[in-house]
Each structure stands twice: as structure tokens, then as C-alpha cells.
Amino acid sequence: MTWPAETALGLIVFLGASVQRLAGIGFALVAAPVLVLLLGPGDGVTLSNVAAGAISAIGLAATWRQLRPGAMVPLIAAAACTVPAGSWVAARVATPHLLLGIGALVSAAVLLVIRGVRVPALRGVGGAVAAGATSGFMNSAAGVGGPAVSLYAVNTGWTAREFVPNAQLYGVVVNALSLTVKGVPHLAVPAWVVTAGALTAGTVLGHALAGRVEERQARRVVLGLALAGGLATLVKGVSGLL
């Protein structure tokens, strides 16, 4: 990678880590579309999995006492079944079509979360299985599995306090599953150093801001950035087809 590309990589990882630590969600939503544009669908998605899993583990270390493991089992089990399918699709779809699909998935998911869509089917064990299966596929194929779990939490009536630690647990496990199936991204050492430094710095900044920024405002910023990234990826995919 050239130094401008490494700088852009560091900035997007820093931003994603900051908003994830600040709002409890958002790294993949904010960073995955841009990482795909910078590194291509393969390495962009897997780097998103690596970084999202790491930032989830950091968050989980501080919130594990609020976990509801029983409620997470159906979600995680269903995701484990669909992660291989997402990886299979991503490996066989041409780059423009994959960019188009990632951009469309991210944009649609963000709009659904913004609207707080209520779906009776996304309740109970059946809802957890449906959300987990959808999330596992999207996480492996596009690097973005959080929206489906967020919609499940909204429809189940979880509070933000309940959602955040359980979302962190889910992020650790599902990103680890995705990387087990696909492997790690093929990056040069300087790119890994930039990613690690940006992840650390973003986490520190997000932690410092967490008590000063209202959660609702933070979520609006996350979703706005995510929608912009999703639309940019969608446009890139369309341009590649023309």
C-alpha cells in the first residue's frame, strides 16, 4: 500500500473504533464499506472482521457482568450455520457485483435500523434464529452483521444497557467464526501496524468521549456515516458494471 492509502486506512479504523467504543455499535457499519473500497472485497471484509472482533473483545472485558448468555445461544448457533454460506458467496461473486451487494446490504440495513422497524417474527427463539442466520451470512459476506442483531434487540425490547455487552459477545464469536472460515487479510506489516495503532487510539478516544456525548447523538453519527459509506460502495459497484 502507498502511504496515502495507509493514511486513509488508519483514519477509517480510528473513526470506526471511536464510534464503536462510544456508541457500543458501529465499527463494521462505518468502516467496512470504506475498507472494501480501499482493499477490495476480500481483504476489506476480513480486515473488518479482525478489527470488529478485537474492538468487541475490548468492550466485552468491561461489560461481561451484564451478559445474558442464554439469550445469545440461538443467535450465535444460527450465525455459525450461515457464516460458511456467506464466505462461499463472497469468494465466487465478481468484484463489481460484490461491491453492489455490500453497498445495498449496508444501506438497507442502516435504513431499517434508523426506522426502528418492528417485525413480530423477530421475537422469541424463532426471531433470534432468523436474526442470527441473517447476521452470520452478512458478516461473512460483507463484514456487517450488526444490523440484524440490532433489529432483533429492538423487537425484543432490550435496553441499550442490555444490548451493548451481548452485542460485544456476539461480535467476538461471529467475527472469529468468519475468520476461521476465510482466513486473515493479506496485508503488509506497515498496514497491520497502522491498523493496530489506529484501533488503540480510537478506542482510547471513544472511551474518553463516552461520558460526554449523549448515546442518541452518537448513534445518529454512526448511522449517518454508515449510510454514506454504504451508498459510496453501491455507487462504486454500479460504476464497475458500466
Image: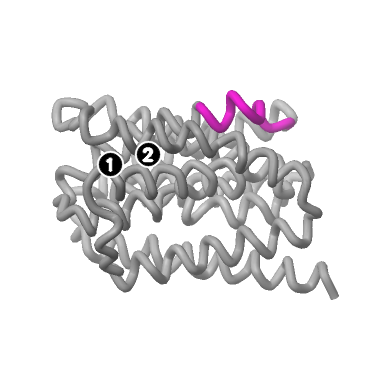
Residue shown at the point (31%, 40%) measured from the top left: 167
Image-quadrant location for residue 238: bottom right
Q: Which residues are magenta?
A: 177-186
- Judging depth in this view, the residue of 116 and 221 nearest the camera is 116
Residue at image mark 2:
203
Q: Amino acid at mark 2?
A: Thr
Residue 94 position within the rendered picture, expressed as x and y whole percent measured from the top left: 81, 54
User: Would you say 21 lies left or right of 41 here?
Assistant: left
Residue shown at the point (49%, 41%) measured from the top left: 136
Residue 137 position within the rendered picture, expressed as x and y whole percent measured from the top left: 54, 45
Residue at image mark 1:
207
In the image, residue 172 sits, relative to residue 130, either above or below, namely above
Residue 22 seen anywhere in this rendered image of the structure: no
User: Would you say 26 lies left or right of 141 here?
Assistant: left
Query: Is label 2 in a helix, a strand or a loop?
Result: helix
Residue 56 position within the rendered picture, expressed as x and y whole percent measured from the top left: 37, 34
Q: Are marks 1 and 2 in contact (CB under 8 Å)?
A: yes
Q: Amino acid at mark 1?
A: His
* The C terminus lies in quadrant: bottom right
User: Would you say 26 lies left or right of 99 here?
Assistant: left
